[in-house]
Image (cartoon, helix red, strand yellow):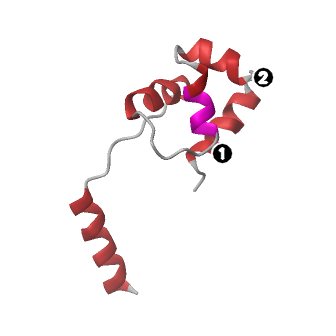
Amino acid sequence: MKSLKTFLKEKRKLAGLTQSEFAEKAGVALTVVRKIEQGKENLNLEKVNHVLSMFGHSLAPADNKEIEINQSLDNENS
């Protein structure tokens, strides 16, 4: 599975856009695109989804209980 930063950078480059051009087209600040492509962890989900919507994608917050349950199931199946 690709990381968010790799996904965005690849898609942006395939579109032939600089970070600045992409930010303008996505309607976000240049710093948002830079933070995503640098792999920063403290990102605004709404802004990330605004950027990802350019490619028909979105992210949803993970529920900690769901993660714990999935990890427990994975451990049982190992």
Determine which quarter of the picture holds residue 35.
top right
The local crowd at label 1, few if under 14, some if 14 to 19, many if 20 or more residues have their Cα within 10 Å, is: some
Amino acid type of the residue tagged 2 in the rendering = Gly
Question: CA gap, disc 1 to disc 2?
Answer: 15 Å
In what element is the residue under mark 1?
helix
Front residue of 43/6: it is 43
Q: In this rendering, would 7 be left or right of 59?
A: right
Which mark, by number, is residue 55? Answer: none
In this rendering, the count of numbered labels is 2
Name the residue tied to disc 1: 6
Mark 1 in CB contact with mark 2 (< 8 angstroms): no
Q: Earlier in the sequence, mark 1 or mark 2?
A: 1
Q: Residue at x 33, y 73 (%)?
A: 71
Quarter of the figure that contains the N terminus: bottom right
Q: Which residue is drawn at 58% across and 26% down?
A: 31
Q: Over which residues does the magenta segment extend?
A: 32-37
Q: Where is residue 24 in the image (x, y as percent from the top left)?
A: 61, 12
Q: What residue did someone put label 2 on?
A: 16
Task: Say what secondary structure mark 2 lies in.
Answer: loop
Asked if 19 appears above or below 41 in the picture, the reply is above
Say if the magenta span includes residue 16: no
In-image side of 30 versus 50 (left or right): right
| Left or right of residue 48, residue 14 in this image | right
Percent coordinates x, y for residue 55 in the rendering: 56, 28
Q: Where is residue 47 in the image (x, y as percent from the top left)?
A: 44, 27
Q: Please state the horizontal and vertical placement of residue 3, each as a whole percent of the image.
A: 58, 50
Up the image or down, 30 lies above or below 60; here it is above
**Residue drawn at (60%, 29%) of the image:** 33
Give the amino acid at mark 1: Thr
Left or right for 21, reference 49: right
Indicate the quadrant where residue 74 lies: bottom left
Which secondary structure is most common in the magenta stretch? helix
